[in-house]
Image: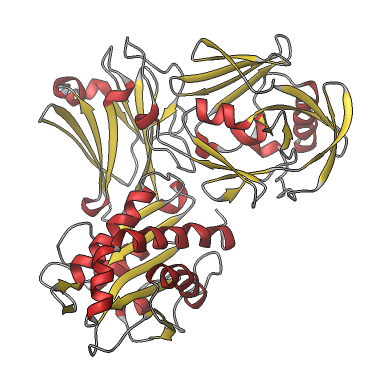
């Protein structure tokens, strides 16, 4: 029976029907080698093309149909990029009868006809840099549908740029709520669109924990979510007063399971707030999507919902000022650095980042390590500022040689080395290197690769002055180190 299913899936690909290909019937692809030549038939002509890769939030897309350049733009397989990569939140279909390629993401759509220079973007006729094509791969002995990558990605609301050094198109996912232009009627999506982009799974009519009926005429752009993990709950925020509607039991369906605790609704400040709280006192992650009729919520462990999980800790806080010197407090500097890193992660949905604090309060040492352990973090980093004599200077990064490895095999030493390689150049301070500290609580009790970076010395007047003015630079360095580390040590989820 399994062989029969595989044969059917294979024939479906060859015939290029509009049928969606189940992921289970397709063998796992490999990473194509950028710059390698592939023999293809394009527009009826046999030719050799150099492979062009594509990365989504820093992770390379595995495929049997590598990208290539045509008309000075990168062409990518519509199936391997849009159908297979769920983090983009795009649905893909192709009709062999009409030769139409359709890509949809929420209210956004790109409809192309093979070999035509024009596409219909949200219903408007738009010229493309090069047409969508049916391309035959001699290596795979199959046809694939290719589309102009940058054009399609940007029209669907994500960002795209070409990297010559990486020989890759770099895609950064963006949320629909910040890029969507809903229809005037308010029912802007007939299909399922993600409200929480970057999740490994998509909540839908066939995969949800809570289903909420929307009132007629409610715009998709009026709905947003907040993962209030500190209070172990999801907040769905709806612009307008819909408390009566959402409070009605007839407008929601909750699948009975051991995790569900409560569903409550409030209204204040022009917004209706729906609070969904799982029963167990553990942190759950959420995938939320909507159609024109329903909001779907799926909750599960963070590792099942997200591909990459990071816990970012601003040292000290609240009653614990940390080190002081030259008119500065450690807790203020570490918070500003973490807030700067957050500003970059806010634009990159490929990473789920949990913060131990984003304001001036004191999380206990156990709270910090427990947060990382509860969410199954792939990385933990704590940001600190050093202090000693006025002459002490430099940047150092601490690790625990007896600490845990991450699920990807990344050790605390290698993780700290990666952090240090970004933070130290950003400070410009003396390189004090990596220091082994087995006694620090957050490095000892955190069950993943963990690191503690000491940016510089607050007791040193020159370094204190520079740190005060460059917290944004250090935050960006922390962000870059984290993103780069996943390219070397992917989470394998």
State left or right for residue 12 relative to residue 453.
Answer: right
Is 87 drawn above or below residue 466 in the view shown?
above
Left of 56 or right of it: where is 34? right
Of all residues, the one furthest to the front in this rendering is 462
Q: Position of residue 157 (x, y in %)?
A: 46, 29
Question: Which is nearer the eye, 173 or 232?
Answer: 173
User: Is residue 15 shown left or right of residue 418?
Assistant: right
Q: Quadrant of residue 198?
A: top left
**Percent x, y for residue 291?**
40, 21
Q: Quadrant of the N terminus?
A: top right
Task: Tell me if residue 481 comes above or below residue 322 in the rendering.
Answer: above
Measuring 47% from the left and 54% from the top, which residue is drawn there?
A: 308
Name the one closer to the observer, 190 or 463: 463
Residue at 49%, 15% (x, y): give it.
Answer: 122
In the rendered view, tell whether residue 399 sits above or below residue 196. Answer: below
Q: Where does the image place residue 348, in percent across and percent down from the top left?
A: 43, 45
Can residue 126 be seen here? yes
Residue 483 position within the rendered picture, expressed as x and y whole percent measured from the top left: 48, 57
The total of numbered circles placed on residues is 0
- Residue at 36 percent of width and 81 percent of height: 394
The reply to whether residue 374 is visible in this rendering is no
Residue at 19% across / 69% down in the picture? Answer: 331
Q: Quadrant of residue 430?
A: bottom left
């Amino acid at each position: 029976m399994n062989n029969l299913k595989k044969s059917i899936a294979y024939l479906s690909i060859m015939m290029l029907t509009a049928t969606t290909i189940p992921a289970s019937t397709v063998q796992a692809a490999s990473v194509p080698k950028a710059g390698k030549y592939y023999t293809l038939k394009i527009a009826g002509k046999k030719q050799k093309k150099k492979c062009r890769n594509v990365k989504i939030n820093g992770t390379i897309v595995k495929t049997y149909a590598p990208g290539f350049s045509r008309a000075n733009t990168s062409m990518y397989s519509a199936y391997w990029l849009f159908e297979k990569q769920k983090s983009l939140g795009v649905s893909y279909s192709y009709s062999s009868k009409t030769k139409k390629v359709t890509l949809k993401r929420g209210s956004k759509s790109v409809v192309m006809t093979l070999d035509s220079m024009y596409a219909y973007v949200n219903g408007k006729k738009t010229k493309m840099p090069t047409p969508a094509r049916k391309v035959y791969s001699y290596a795979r002995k199959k046809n694939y549908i290719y589309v102009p990558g940058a054009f399609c990605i940007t029209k669907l609301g994500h960002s795209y740029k070409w990297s010559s050094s990486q020989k890759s198109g770099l895609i950064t996912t963006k949320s629909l709520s910040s890029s969507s232009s809903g229809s005037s009627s308010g029912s802007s999506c007939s299909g399922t669109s993600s409200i929480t982009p970057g999740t490994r799974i998509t909540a839908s009519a066939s995969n949800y924990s809570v289903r909420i009926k929307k009132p007629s005429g409610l715009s998709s752009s009026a709905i947003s979510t907040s993962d209030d993990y500190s209070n172990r709950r999801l907040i769905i925020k709806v612009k307008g007063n819909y408390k009566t509607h959402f409070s009605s039991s007839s407008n929601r369906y909750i699948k009975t399971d051991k995790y569900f605790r409560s569903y409550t609704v409030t209204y204040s400040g022009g917004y209706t707030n729906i609070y969904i709280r799982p029963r167990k006192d553990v942190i759950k992650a959420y995938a939320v999507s909507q159609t024109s009729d329903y909001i779907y919520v799926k909750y599960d462990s963070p590792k099942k919902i997200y591909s990459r999980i990071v816990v970012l800790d601003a040292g000290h806080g609240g009653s614990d000022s940390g080190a002081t010197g030259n008119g500065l407090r450690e807790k203020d500097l570490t918070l500003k650095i973490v807030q700067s890193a957050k500003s970059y992660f806010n634009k990159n949905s490929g990473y789920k980042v949990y913060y131990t604090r984003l304001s001036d309060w004191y999380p206990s040492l156990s709270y910090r390590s427990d947060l990382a352990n509860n969410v199954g973090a792939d990385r933990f980093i704590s940001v600190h500022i050093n202090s000693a004599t006025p002459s002490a200077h430099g940047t150092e990064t601490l690790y625990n040689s007896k600490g845990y490895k991450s699920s990807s095999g990344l050790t605390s030493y290698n993780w700290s080395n990666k952090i240090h390689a970004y933070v130290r150049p950003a400070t410009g301070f003396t390189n004090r290197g990596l220091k082994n500290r087995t006694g620090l609580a957050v490095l000892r009790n955190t069950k993943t690769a963990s690191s503690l970076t000491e940016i510089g010395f607050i007791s040193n007047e020159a370094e204190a002055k520079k740190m005060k003015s460059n917290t944004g630079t250090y935050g960006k360095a922390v962000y870059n180190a984290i993103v780069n580390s996943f390219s070397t040590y992917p989470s394998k989820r």
